[in-house]
Image (spheres, rainbow, N blue to C red):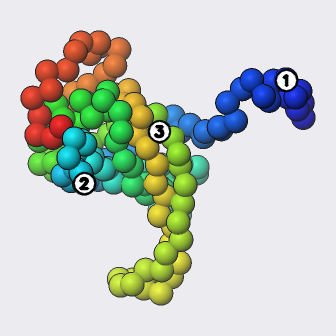
Amino acid sequence: MNRPNEDQTQNENSYINVIIDAFGYINNIKVSPPKSAGRKDEVRLSMAIPYGSYDQENKPRKKYYSMVVPTEQARDVLRENYSAIQDSELKITVGFVASDGDALPFVFKEGKRQGEMGVTHFGSLLKIKWLKVGDTLVYSEKINKKESNKTGTFN
């Protein structure tokens, strides 16, 4: 492994970030009012992100993430499609870029897994590449290179 020399280390930012470039399913969107004046609403998503091989029932394995949405681009796409996401009985599929992925352990308090250990994954949704409601593509960064009209239900 090559290590940076001392001059490079002093001149470069020492922050390292893990970037997730994936697709997943939006399970829920939650908008909370700002915690202080002059701040924006807090937007959070619950997502299922498929990974790895299929399980014994021939279904993809999934990790469940709680994502905060700090960027204007992602907030604009979600704002424009908020009603469709919130009201849809259809699958909401999204291609995205996220960062700050981390995990916290917890114990299930009820249900068939009561008493078992689980993990909550969380991160920051930085960019939405595409968004589908059911089989309908409602947003694609390749097609929608236009300015958002910002007429949605949260700021």
The image shows residue 127 at horizontal and vertical percentages of 39, 30
The image shows residue 66 at horizontal and vertical percentages of 39, 55
Specify whether residue 22 is in view: no
Q: Which residue is mark 2?
A: 35
Q: Nearer the viewer, residue 129 or 61?
A: 129
| Vertical order, 49 against 137 (above or below) | below
Who comes first in sequence, dot 2 or dot 3?
A: 2
Q: CA distance from mark 2 to mark 1?
A: 42 Å
Q: Residue at x 39, y 49 (%)?
A: 67
Q: From the image, which quarter does the N terminus lie in?
A: top right
Q: Nearer the viewer, residue 9 or 60?
A: 9
Specify whether residue 102 is in view: yes
Q: Residues within 10 Å of mark 1 (few under 14, many from 20)?
A: few
Q: Which residue is mark 3?
A: 98
Task: Kindly state the secondary structure of the residue where label 2 is placed.
Answer: loop
Callout 2, which amino acid? Lys
The image shows residue 37 at horizontal and vertical percentages of 20, 46
Who comes first in sequence, dot 1 or dot 3?
A: 1
Q: Nearer the viewer, residue 136 or 41?
A: 41
Q: Which residue is mark 1?
A: 7
Q: Nearer the viewer, mark 1 or mark 3?
A: 1
The dot on residue 73 is none
Q: From the image, which quarter does the C terminus lie in?
A: top left
Callout 1, which amino acid? Asp
